Amino acid sequence: MSLPSSLKYSASNSRLVRLSLLTAFGIILFLFESLIPRPLPWLKPGLSHIATLIALYTMGISDAMIIVILRILVGSLLVGTLFNPAFILSLGGGIAATMAMSLARRYFSKIFSIFGVSILGAVVHNMTQLFLVEILIIGRIEIFYLAPVMILSSLFTGFIVAFASYLLVEKTRLL
């Protein structure tokens, strides 16, 4: 007896399942880190980017971008920030970081390991957010005085995200 064609396992079903699982994983991490107390209101570890980095290394740029956009949309809907300034900053930073990470991975993989790609993504994410705050919210260049603090925090958080992603990517390669 044969299964109906709609129930047969295929590569597209596998991709959809992996996209769904990584998106859900990213949303769970986003919700978890929203509960963590922060020393500064804008300083987050960016744990949800683990899902993006895993997707980038195991599935490709288009799937990583889908995960970023879905994660930010659903996460913002769940915490009540959909379409407010925090959402715009998150979406802008997430898209810019994913693009930068994909370019680094694609064209500079001999220079950047997963750690360099992740740190670059964290820096681009934070700098994009500063740029958007300056353009859309406060209109003052002085916001860039925060750049050294944000870059320093990006080094730390980018490393943590890369370390977790590296462990998970290596585990999945063994399966």
Image (tube, rainbow, N blue to C red):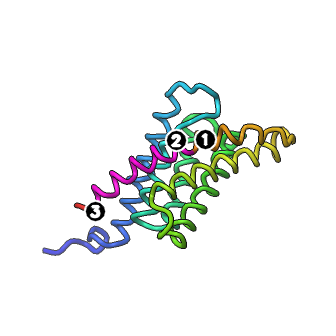
Does the magenta portion include 15? Answer: no
Q: Which residues are magenta?
A: 155-172
How many marks do you count on the picture?
3
Image quarter of the C terminus:
bottom left
Q: Residue at x 64, y 37 (%)?
A: 81
The image position of residue 72, as x and y in percent, is: 57, 47
> Residue 168, position in %: x, y?
33, 52
Classify 35 as above or below 69.
above
Q: Magenta stretch mostly in which secondary structure?
A: helix
Q: Which mark is residue 173?
A: 3
Q: Nearer the viewer, residue 85 or 112?
A: 112
**Amino acid type indicated by mark 3:** Arg
Within 10 angstroms of label 2, few (less than 14), some, or many (20 or more) residues?
A: some
Q: Residue beneath label 2, please?
A: 156
Q: Nearer the viewer, mark 3 or mark 2?
A: 2
Residue tagged 1 = 152
Q: For the residue marked with disc 2, what is the amino acid?
A: Phe
Name the disc covering residue 104, or none: none
Contact between labelled residues 2 and 1, with CB atoms less than 8 Å apart: yes
- Residue under the image location 31 percent in, 72 percent down: 10
